[in-house]
Image (spheres, rainbow, N blue to C red):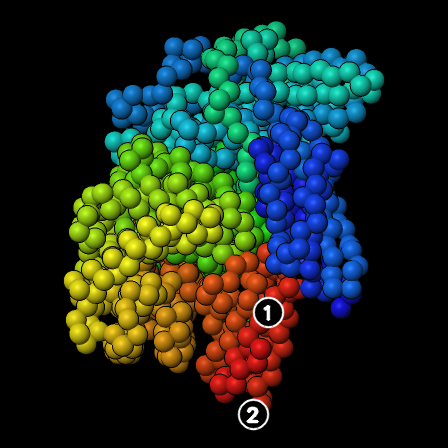
Amino acid sequence: MGAALPHDLRCDHRTTPLGVAGRPSLGWRLEGADPIAYRVDVGEVWSSGRIEDPDAICHPYDGPPLLPRTRYAWRVTLWDGTGAARTAESWFETGNDAWTAAWIAPDPHAVEHVDPPTEGERALAAHGLLPCPQLRRSFEIPRAVSTARLYISAKGLYHALINGRRVGDAELAPGWTDYRERLQYQTYDVTSLVGEGENALAVTVADGWWSGFAGFDPRQPGYHYGRFPELIAELHLTLADGSTRVVMTDGSWRTAHGHVRHGDLLKGECHDLRAATPGWDLPGFDDSAWHPVVVTGADHHLLVPSADEPVRVLRELAPVSVTRTGPLTHLVDFGQNLAGRVRLAVPAQEPGTRVVVRHGEKLEDDGRLHTANLRTADATDMLVTASTAASFEPRFTYHGFRYAEISGVERLGEVKAVVLHSDTRWTGTFECSDPEINRLHRNIEWGQRGNFVSVPTDCPQRDERLGWMADAQVFLPTACLNADVAAFFAKWLRDVRDAQSPEGGFPNVAPRLTGVAEEGAPGWADAGVLVPWHLYTVYGDARFLDVDSMAAWVDFVLRHNPGLIWREKTGPHYADWLAPGPATPREVVATAFFHRSAHLTARAAQVRGRYGEADRFHSLASGIRTTFIKTFVDPRGAVMGDTQTGYLLALAFDLLPAALARRAAERLAELVEENGPQAGFLGVNLLCPVLSATGRPDLAHALLRRTDPPSWLHQVRNGATTVWERWDGEGAPSMNSFNHYAFGSVGEWLYTGVAGIAQAPDSVAYRELVIRPLPGDLSWARASYESARGRIAVSWERADEDFRLSVTVPPGASATVHLPDGRVHR
Ligand code: BGC
């Protein structure tokens, strides 16, 4: 087994990040023997000292304030029982906490408009799509450069080049936050892009979420945060002689429009190559005919270093077919519904030829693109050619699509779908003997790819793409198994807290934008408590638990509902959204979540050592439970409404005493047997877990393998390559997305149920595993998971009467293994 080895060192849940702020959390994974003690050292600056804790996998930096723009080496030492010590090393770099650059904008009107848009202006925001400005400046570097860092952000989106070469590989940067509260900047190591002599920094900016179209409210389609894109950047150079220089955005920059005639997240992008300005991104370019930029301000207080990995191009797909559908029209099928864009090579054409790319998730019966479900998202990109062959890929937009219709040219060059999403490392694998279940698992993974784009979204295709909080909350357990989403959700939790009202109310969507109901609904707003708790249990970092924010939410609901039934302040109350069966009574749904949030807030307070609050929220939770039983549960265990989701919430949230819980579980089983699944967004993630936990894994399997609608495999049998918004995929096109992950939350149970990788109820960061494979009629399954502690793997197979199981457990973890015949091994 060897010594206890630390590996995969992470700072604030990222590998060697640039731009760290504050006191980062330093984490590691384990290999080899069980550790008995650890120590963390950050350079010569700070040491945790040796700590006798066999369970630890992270420790917050607790030394003196870190210097800005500085690289720190750090290391973890682990001791095992033999006294052997092993060390692993990594580094992180701190961010720019002392900005001096100015915000600059190309549009003179921007100076008059530094205040956020008014309601009336937002209403008028059906603005024409404007060209994306180019901004540039040349500068001299007197001698060789030893290090160079670019700190950069935009109100809008930016695409930066130094001496004609792309800076970094982030897409849609700086990402989406509520820009009234917080604006992320990115840090790039650009040492290899600069050099002695004249250099050029060249940036194109676009509206993005800042001033472009976002969301679905026809009264406020755009201009959510501002009117014009603006840029800020500082390039810090350390030269070979040790001297330093800073090149920054200021009034000396020049601006002009170029070939990007517009770029909008929902509407699409247009490049007119006849308007290109060749060489503008290179030194030596004469920009004297360009306009001076305007300086719009020098406020830096909202700038924060980005907390997660950016959106990147993470895959490319070749078409499975390209069909000529007219003299100048082609239909491309990529075989996979995805979020991203098309990259297209266009052979030389008559200058001014318009090549139009439209996108759709499905085809109509007559073979045309189905675009009705995009609503006002035009999702249309255009290239206007100059005289030479060209390659076209938009930069400031993305679309949800499987098919693209390309028109305007007789012949196409190479066509690729470029897949974009927030870069979260994949941690899970799952496979079993049923190929349709494997397809379902892949569809769930694709749903995650398509909807983790800077924020967790509901869907990537229509004019919505918002950080809907229930969708995120129900899918989170699945997401955490598929990928390491710690940093992604750490960033989003800031968005959630930014969106919390001064009274404590959480909203329905985060980041907040204007026009969407701000008062949160049960199960949506509660994500502000459920998400941090789940992240803590998966990743073991207690910093996810912001007890003040969680407590403020629960107290908000309590203040308006002192009788402990949640009736007031339920926002738009979406109840059990898109449930196909009878509706679960709203008060039952709401009060169950009220209990859940109070209970988890109590546990979070306990973890953070705030025992007084822990007691208070524990008694509140127990009061809500008693009131729930008194008001909604009859002596035979029937929960008011007699719906699947009513029973699921009551059982999963432990709202019933044992005897009533038994009756409720029986009734749930009857309802599932009679009707198949009838849960909507708030119950679907609980269906298989609750059925199997209450002794009916057979029924959970029956649901999983059911092919009649409503069912998961009905989608698979009908050609789904992602998970649909509605169980049956039927319904008005205006609300019928084919890439919505909420119903994909069954993905969790593929790992925890079918394969049997789960942690014990009170375990944190997979310290105590429960390996309980539930084979159903399957003949084999295998799954693996790179947990925060280390690698977990299960593989089982049935041959005649034999059940063969192999299990890998990470160091420092214990496992209880339950075999299908009832035997238990510890
Ligand atoms: C979104 C959902 C969201 C819901 C609120 C829809 O339009 O697409 O996924 O949770 O609104 O009920």
Residue 477 spot, x, y in % from top left:
46, 58
Quadrant (top left, top right, bottom left, bottom right) of the N terminus: bottom right
User: Looking at the image, which residue is at 62% across and 40% down?
Assistant: 61
Residue 606 spot, x, y in % from top left:
43, 52
User: Looking at the image, which residue is at 52% across and 79% down?
Assistant: 818
* 179 or 199: nearer the viewer: 179
Q: Which residue is mark 1?
A: 814
Q: Secondary structure at mark 1?
A: strand
Q: Which residue is mark 2?
A: 800
* 613 or 373: nearer the viewer: 613
Cα–Cα span, label 2 and label 1: 30 Å
Q: Earlier in the sequence, mark 2 or mark 1?
A: 2
Amino acid at dot 1: Ser
Name above or below for residue 615 compared with residue 500. Answer: below
Name above or below for residue 278 compared with residue 187. Answer: above
Callout 1: CB less than 8 Å from ligand 1: no
Q: Is residue 623 left or right of residue 13?
A: left
Amino acid at dot 2: Asp
User: Looking at the image, which residue is at 82% across and 20% down?
Assistant: 240
